[in-house]
Amino acid sequence: MRRLDVQRRIVFIDASEEGAACPIDRQALLNRFHAQEDGVLLSGAAAFAAMWRAIPVLRPLGLLARSPTVLRILERAYLKFLTLRPRLQKLAGA
């Protein structure tokens, strides 16, 4: 995502780093993806959609995710991904 963000509109913060600014509980930040858009803290699929809206090439997908139906589908997919994430991390050697 950083490479796609050529306009540097996204500020990435690694919540796992000691001393990182955490607007909510650090473990909550590490359990789900979070993003802030227009002063609102979002998590899960809504956070990904906000990030996509900030990246010109992904903006159409982010705008599509403003639909409650589309966002609900994306959130279900994200929740499924979260159940698979530990296995994927092991496969990747993380």
Image (cartoon, rainbow, N blue to C red):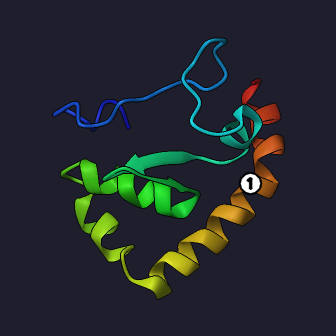
Q: Is residue 20 left or right of residue 71?
A: right
Residue 93 falls in image quadrant: top right
Q: Which of 41 and 72 lies nearest the eye of the viewer?
A: 41
Dot 1: within a 10 Å radius of its alpha carbon, few (fewer than 14), some, or many (20 or more) residues?
some
Residue 10 falls in image quadrant: top left
Q: Is residue 93 left or right of residue 60?
A: right
- Which of the image's four quarters has the N terminus? top left
The residue under label 1 is 82
Q: What is the x, y in percent for residue 50? A: 37, 56
Q: Residue at x 55, y 24 (%)?
A: 14
Q: Residue at x 30, y 30 (%)?
A: 3
Q: Residue at x 33, y 64 (%)?
A: 62
Q: Is residue 2 left or right of residue 60?
A: right
Q: Residue at x 76, y 36 (%)?
A: 27
Q: Is residue 68 above or below residue 8?
A: below
Q: Which residue type does callout 1 highlight?
A: Leu
Q: Which of 32 and 91 lies nearest the eye of the viewer?
A: 32
Q: What is the x, y in percent for residue 80? A: 73, 65
Q: Is residue 77 above or below residue 54?
A: below
Q: Residue furthest bottom?
A: 69
Helix, strand or loop for disc 1? helix
Q: What is the x, y in percent for residue 19? A: 61, 12
